[in-house]
Image (spheres, rainbow, N blue to C red):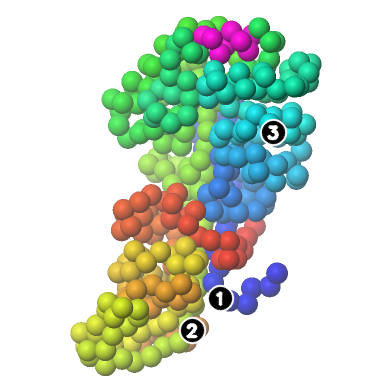
């Protein structure tokens, strides 16, 4: 559909593909590279993004729900897809039919799958990845006895454990991360993993901050694919930017108010620009006070952000219908994240579907 509102997100497919190539080239000691494409590839949207990730060298995909997996499977028939979230047992049949790998998060969850009226020959086609909780205390098995019981039941029913993994929750905390590594190693040592095909531990930050663990052959690439990493030697490029435009310019007098609830009062005669983007597009009201860019020059958002519009304090250099960079690049998104006391993931995922994505090849 044609874009009628000058508000859009620009997605650079070439940069995504090149970023993945660079990452795999540098961290080439793994056999399995999982591309984490949940939440519409962190707000990037569209299967074009997934194709770029695959073209870059990723050979497995991760999603958070069966819905996400099935949308991807419609176009990408062969690449393995792992659902990191919990799929209700009654939908396991759909996973088998569509070759969706399932995460086993507990013995109880495995029992509920085994209780289904699915013929064992059919159930043997299901790929299982056992999730171990090594310190995040979210999903996963954290107890040795539960892990042994789960693994023995899987073995008893001749089911296929394709993978075993954990999630590092705070890679910047070296002491705690090393504790997670140790916990993971202790857990897998209590079962026979000799026939487990994939052991995957590193996520984006862990990959770039720690040496490869000897027994690990898989890593999960998430936000690093989109240019966010502490490893600046990779020279990754920005892939996500958001733009809108100035739809009206007006002069206001000293003492006049701007926006809902009169939270901004002009301290002098000022020029303001009305920009066609707001909190319904994902620019939440906490963005007030931070910078946007017009013609590469910084301007501040003023007043309460509206549902469909926001206001910026400008000067005579700004003209009607000039483009406004709401998110300019990786550096700018990181600055916005700090300003909002959050992380780049949330900033990008907040951009709603009504902001049209445009793709650069």
- Which quarter of the rendering shows the C terminus? bottom right
Percent x, y of residue 163: 59, 21
How many residues crowd around disc 1 within 10 Å: few (fewer than 14), some, or many (20 or more)? some
SS for dot 2: strand
280 to the left or right of 98? left
137 to the left or right of 308? left
Front residue of this view, candidates 123 and 325: 123
Disc 3 and disc 1: Cα gap in Å?
A: 41 Å
Find disc 3 in the rendering and name its residue. Answer: 91
Residue at 49 percent of width and 53 percent of height: 349
SS for dot 1: loop
CB contact under 8 Å: marks 2 and 1: yes
Front residue of this view, candidates 104 and 55: 104
Q: Quadrant of residue 334?
A: bottom left
Front residue of this view, candidates 196 and 229: 196
Find disc 2 in the rendering and name its residue. Answer: 247
Q: What's drawn in magenta, residue-wise?
A: 148-155
Say whether residue 217 is visible: no
Question: Of callouts 3 and 1, which one flags the residue occurring earlier in the amino acid sequence?
Answer: 1
Percent x, y of residue 332: 39, 59
Say whether residue 344 is visible: yes
Find disc 1 in the rendering and name its residue. Answer: 6
Residue at 39 percent of width and 33 percent of height: 169
Chief secondary structure of the magenta span? helix
Looking at the image, how many numbered discs can be counted on the residues? 3
Percent x, y of residue 6: 56, 76
Percent x, y of residue 191: 52, 7
Q: 134 above or below 296?
A: above
- Which quarter of the rendering shows the N terminus? bottom right
Q: 338 above or below 232?
A: below
How many residues crowd around disc 3 within 10 Å: few (fewer than 14), some, or many (20 or more)? few
Question: Of callouts 2 and 1, which one flags the residue occurring earlier in the amino acid sequence?
Answer: 1
């Amino acid at each position: 559909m044609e874009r009628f509102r000058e508000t859009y997100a620009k997605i650079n497919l070439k940069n995504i593909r090149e970023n993945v190539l660079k990452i795999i080239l540098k961290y080439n000691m793994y056999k399995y590279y999982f591309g984490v494409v949940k939440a519409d590839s962190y707000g990037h949207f569209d299967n074009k993004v997934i194709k770029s990730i695959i073209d870059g060298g990723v050979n497995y995909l991760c999603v958070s729900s069966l819905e996400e997996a099935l949308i991807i499977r419609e176009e990408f028939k062969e690449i393995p897809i792992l659902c990191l979230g919990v799929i209700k047992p009654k939908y396991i049949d759909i996973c088998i039919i569509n070759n969706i790998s399932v995460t086993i998060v507990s013995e109880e969850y495995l029992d509920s799958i085994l209780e289904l009226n699915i013929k064992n020959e059919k159930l043997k086609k299901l790929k299982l990845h056992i999730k171990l909780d090594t310190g995040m205390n979210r999903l996963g098995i954290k107890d040795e006895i539960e892990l042994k019981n789960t693994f023995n039941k899987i073995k008893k029913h001749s089911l296929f454990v394709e993978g075993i993994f954990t999630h590092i929750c705070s890679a910047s905390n070296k002491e705690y991360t090393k504790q997670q590594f140790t916990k993971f190693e202790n857990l897998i040592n209590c079962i026979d993993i000799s026939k487990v095909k994939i052991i995957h531990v590193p996520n984006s930050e862990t990959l770039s901050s720690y040496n490869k663990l000897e027994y690990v052959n898989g890593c999960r690439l998430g936000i690093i694919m989109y240019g966010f990493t502490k490893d600046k030697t990779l020279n990754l490029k920005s892939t996500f930017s958001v733009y809108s435009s100035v739809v009206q310019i007006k002069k206001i007098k000293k003492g006049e108010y701007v926006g809902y609830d009169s939270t901004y009062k002009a301290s002098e005669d000022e020029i303001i620009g009305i920009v066609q983007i707001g909190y319904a597009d994902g620019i939440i009201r906490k963005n007030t006070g931070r910078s946007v860019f017009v013609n590469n020059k910084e301007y501040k958002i003023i007043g309460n952000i509206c549902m469909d519009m926001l206001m910026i304090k400008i000067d005579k250099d700004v003209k009607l219908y000039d483009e406004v960079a709401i998110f300019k690049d990786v550096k700018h998104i990181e600055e916005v994240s700090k300003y909002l006391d959050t992380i780049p993931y949330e900033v990008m995922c907040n951009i709603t579907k009504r902001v049209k994505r445009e793709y650069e090849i």
